[in-house]
Amino acid sequence: MNRSATATGETYSGPVRDEGLLSFEGVFFTERPVGQMRPGDHAWLAFGGSEERERVVGAFVTAGLATEEKVVYVTDADPLNLPGVRWPGGADPHAYVRSGALRVLPRERTCLSGDRFDPRRLLDALGEEVSRAFGEGFRAVRITLDLTWATAHAPEEVAACEHGLAAAVSPSTMAMAICQVDRRAVAADRLAALRGAHEVLARPDPEFDDGVLRLVRTFDPPGLRLEGELDAARHTVFAERLARAAAGRRRVHLDCGRLRFMDPAALNVLVRQAMRLPRDGRLVLDRMPPHLARMIDAVGWARLPGLAPGRSGGR
């Protein structure tokens, strides 16, 4: 059991979400927006596409460099083409490399002994980078690597690596890490096993958050998650963020499971966006809370063209 589970002393059989805490099969995780990550976080990102990866890994890398933290990326890619990173205009990745702020470590030199994945070699290399960073004057070190390739061929070694990385990062006052895996390329049982080695699930930063309403981009399925209260004062910003999430899509999902209140007029916002979708497109409402379901039942689905009921219950 990981540190979060021990602290609570509770176990549950299904998913539970409350204030960023997620439980799955009795193991607790913290959901953390990438902009709120801090030293000691050993985070997990099972991405399903380039946009999701960019919004987490790209933000993790560029924010670290902007705040004069050291970034260590284990990859064979050139600094100009780091996976998931879209450099802002005018940025010179090679300048970060020359200054030591960005360290790009190739797999062969960092991860392999012969043709086998070597967890100890990787952990030693990362530990050396963290130790060196303190003397170089960096206030924190951000580490990221994509383990999809290794997970497919050496799952036991990857599991050992993850537990070793957790032991090094979790008590650290300087290091934080995001371990990436392409969930489309790894079997579900292996994904579940590796997820259990992490205490933090890295998430994109909210599209909007004013303390009353939070809008978070989702990717599987694509759309938005609504949290809090959607009232008349927030219709405009909701419509704008929903239009962005729906751009170029036929089917868009709204996860309403954390929505505490929606005023009736917000249904007009939903219908207007649904009508802008391509022909036969749908705006799907997932995990509708009772108050929203009652409101729609009173109006009638037939009077809300383009809207459709979706999943119910947990994820």
Image (cartoon, rainbow, N blue to C red):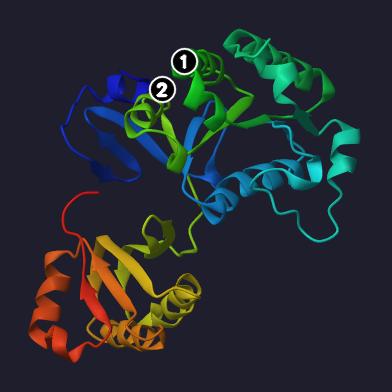
Tell which of 68 and 186 is nearer to you. Answer: 186
Q: How many marks?
A: 2
Does residue 271 appear to the left or right of 110 in the view shown? Answer: left
Q: Eyeballing the image, is 11 above or below 1?
A: below
Callout 2 amino acid: Ala
Tell which of 52 and 117 is nearer to you. Answer: 117
Question: Dot 2: within a 10 Å radius of its alpha carbon, few (fewer than 14), some, or many (20 or more) residues?
Answer: many
Identify the image quadrant of residue 114.
Answer: top right
Q: Does residue 161 appear in this view?
A: yes
**Quadrant in which the N terminus is drawn:** top left
**In the image, what residue occupies the spot 43% across and 74% down?**
242
**In the image, what residue occupies the spot 22% across and 75% down?**
308
Q: Does residue 126 appear in this view?
A: no
**In the image, what residue occupies the spot 47% across and 73% down?**
241
Q: CA distance from mark 1 to mark 2?
A: 6 Å
What is the x, y in percent for residue 293? 13, 72
Identify the image quadrant of residue 260.
Answer: bottom left
What is the x, y in percent for residue 130? 70, 19
Instruction: Name the N-terminal-most of marks 1 and 2.
Output: 1
Callout 1 amino acid: His
Residue beneath disc 2: 197
Does residue 170 appear to the left or right of 59 in the view shown? Answer: left
Mark carried by residue 163: 1
Residue contact between numbered discs 1 and 2, judged by CB atoms under 8 Å: yes
Q: Please, what secondary structure does the residue beneath circle 2 have?
A: loop
